[in-house]
Amino acid sequence: MGADPTGPYLLGVDIGTSSTKGVLTTPDGTVLRTATRPHGVSRPRPGWVEHDPDRVWWDEFVSVTRELLTGAPAGGVPANAVPAGAVAGVAVSGIGPCLLPTSDAGDPLRPAILYGVDTRASAEITELNQAYGAEALIARGGSPLTSQAIGPKLLWLRRHEPQVWQRTRRFMMASSLLVHRLTGEYVLDHHSASQCDPLYDLTSGSWATDLADEIAPGLRLPRLHWPTEVVGRITDAAAAQTGLAAGTPVTAGTVDAWAEAASVGATRPGDLMLMYGTTMFLVQTVDRPTRHPGLWATTGVLPGSHCLAAGMATSGAVIEWFRELTGGPDYAELTAQAAAVPAGSDGLLVLPYFAGERTPIFDDQARGVIAGLTIDHGRGHLYRALLEATAYGVRHNLTTMAEVADPARRVIAVGGGARSLWTQIVSDVTSCAQLIPEQTIGACYGDAYLAAVGVGLATTADDWTRRAGMVRPNPGATTRYDQYYQAYRELYPATRPITHRLAALATESATAR
């Protein structure tokens, strides 16, 4: 491996929407090994998006961890194995906020209900806003109630699955389930809790127990810690399953996007992480709690820090959908075709709301729109227009953030699409330069950093980021995109009544089948 086989090493594992990724690093951030397991989501009904917590979250954690320790994929011959005791600390992250109801022993009672892409609790959102007041909830929790919030989903569970609710004593997310299975501890980090609207008080930094008792009576809330805090140690049972040494420290874990921000050092006021993935996500660190009805206000990953966040419902997911729809060409071919098309895709404009939209419009009934299509447009035009659509969405979110916070001083691109034509288009549309770090592995790398801080092998002042390049906007393209962006902003309100009607008809059709 090119490193001292006795360590110390840090292990980070992230449960994403479409894959589980793990990394083994040294205390200075040098990557020794990586491992990945692809997976999908379950969509049992329109608006429902779920994960199997055992098969996806735990089994893939075990598989990835064993590969990182043995140097061999599942079923392979171990090569250059790492002694279990060489791992000095473990940290995990995962998609969130999610709702996994469990028994008092921590046993899952149903599949996990995923974050904002799962829109089943729309009626409960309306009910809670009416009961407590939308503005009052934002003032206390920092964020509006949307499909991202945990409180409405808990209320939905009470209403629609009473047999499950009767047995529910705890709730977990991907990270906290893993921490529980590794250590036996029932904890949640402050950042994840701050996305459990309206159950967390952003000002006091504690559970809003009065609201929790009314919305989810009888639910035992987890103990709160910061993501950098060690909350427990690997048990003998977990050691037998994972190959890690019993007694290894485990930190509290967090939501994947915030671990990804930590992976590139975007943790100081003025830093903004732009995550290119299945969904596009933006996290800006601010110097104080800041609220906006079109954004999420949360705590950060470092003690006492604060963030504004934005997230699109789709980005990479739509791009992959298009690739499969057009016969599965590789991305290099699609990129070459799109690069040959001028900025603006020759008059083609797309709304990327193929699964509704989160910030800043919070409309789960929004739908994708392709406008300006002619028989002269080809596959390259459509592919470029989809990339441009996500860039317009980023600009819309940045513009919204600028209404309540100073513009970001440093924008850092992360994720699978961070080194591509996509990145250049986003810079051209937004007029923002983007720093490209050397490591774009993602949240699992941030987990390793958080583990290093937790066990004292790094400090919060340390930054593992090594700069690999900078993407700067092309002024000529930016001028052209300004016109298309204005049309983009006008297209949604112009088509909203029609797309809402179509969404309702689609739901009726699916229900009737």
Image: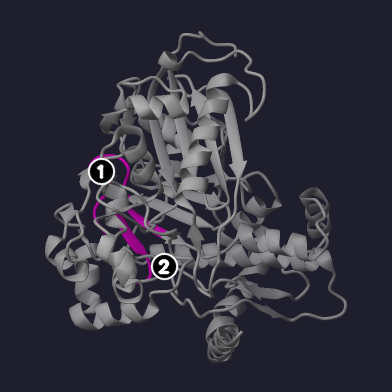
292 lies left or right of 505: left
Identify the residue shown where x is 44% and y is 65%.
116
Q: Position of residue 50 (x, y in %)?
A: 49, 61
| Quadrant of res 296 | bottom left
Nearest the eye: 189 or 374: 189
Dot 2 amino acid type: Thr
Identify the residue shown where x is 16% and y is 53%.
206
Q: Earlier in the sequence, mark 1 or mark 2?
A: 1
User: Please, what is the dominant secondary structure of the magenta stretch?
Assistant: loop
Residue pointed to by mark 1: 186
Dot 1 amino acid type: Tyr
Magenta stretch encompasses residue 462: no
Label 1: few (<14), some (14–19) or many (≥20) C-alpha neighbours in 10 Å: many
Kindly give the residue lying farthest to the left in the view shown: 210
Q: Is residue 383 visible?
A: yes
Q: Position of residue 121 (x, y in %)?
A: 38, 74
Label 2: few (<14), some (14–19) or many (≥20) C-alpha neighbours in 10 Å: some
Q: Position of residue 284 (x, y in %)?
A: 39, 52
Q: Mark 2: which secondary structure?
A: helix
Residue pointed to by mark 2: 400
| Quadrant of res 77 | top right
Identify the residue shown where x is 42% and y is 52%.
283
Q: Is residue 144 visible?
A: no
Range of magenta residues = 286-309
361 lies left or right of 387: left
Tell which tag, 1 or 2, sits nearer the viewer.
1
